[in-house]
Image: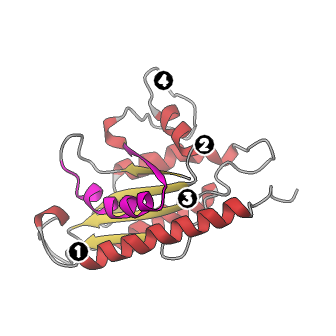
Amino acid sequence: MKALVINCTLKKSPEPSNTEALFRTVTEQLEREGVGVDVVRAVDLDLAPGVVSEAVHDGDDWPGVHEKLLASEILVMASPTWLGQPSSVAKRVLERMEGMMSETDDDGRPVAYNRVAGVVVTGNEDGAHHVISQITGGLQDIGYTIPGQAWTYWNQGPGPGPSFLEGGSGHDWSQKTGRAMAANLLGVARALAANPLGAPPQ
């Protein structure tokens, strides 16, 4: 079983990412269960605008990300909150993933079938549930299965305040919820592996 995390922070490596600090709770739990984890920091890549899986121009890094998506049974989308919205990087990733909607496997199933997905959100402002609903809504359209409580988030509440790495309250809850998220993702991924969805009726 393999998991892919796409970190949609706006911060390029090696700058510390609050979003990564929280999603590591999820990946550590998955790794304890024997899941192999790969992480992509999308902002480090050249991801051209578009809604196709193929390269839009020379140097477009999306085909490599697409390959990682197809190699993973579990996807975690991780995004900060800006103005109550997913990051612009998260939206770019979802736009490129739309190309998967027209792709099928050898049995005629949409390629996202029998894969699960969840969301991690951070921010020192409110809006986490809105971000979660936007991202999971898109992933469901593509064909991913979203288990119950396949998310965790942290925010400091209304008004300015510290980021996740700077302190604040609520870390224990966010981390506990992250471990539950990991268990739910893995449980449903294993169930789908044992009893996979078939191709949609024609």
User: Is 188 located above or below residue 88 in the figure?
Assistant: below
Question: Residue flagged by tag 3: what amino acid is it?
Answer: Leu
Q: CA distance from mark 1 to mark 4?
A: 42 Å
**Which residue range is magenta in the image?**
16-40
Q: What secondary structure characterizes most of the magenta part?
A: helix
Element under disc 2: helix
Q: Please name the residue shown 44% across and 31% down the image.
A: 61
Q: Which mark is residue 155?
A: none
Element under disc 3: helix
Question: Residue flagged by tag 2: what amino acid is it?
Answer: Gly
Q: CA distance from mark 3 to mark 4?
A: 25 Å
Q: Which mark is residue 57?
A: 4
- Is residue 59 shown to the viewer in this render? yes
Taking depth in this image into account, of 144 and 134 the one nearest to the observer is 144
Residue 138 location (% of width, % of height):
54, 59
Whichever of callouts 2 and 4 sits on the residue coming sooner in the sequence is 4
* Residue marked by disc 1: 171
Q: Which mark is residue 99?
A: 2
* Residue marked by disc 3: 139
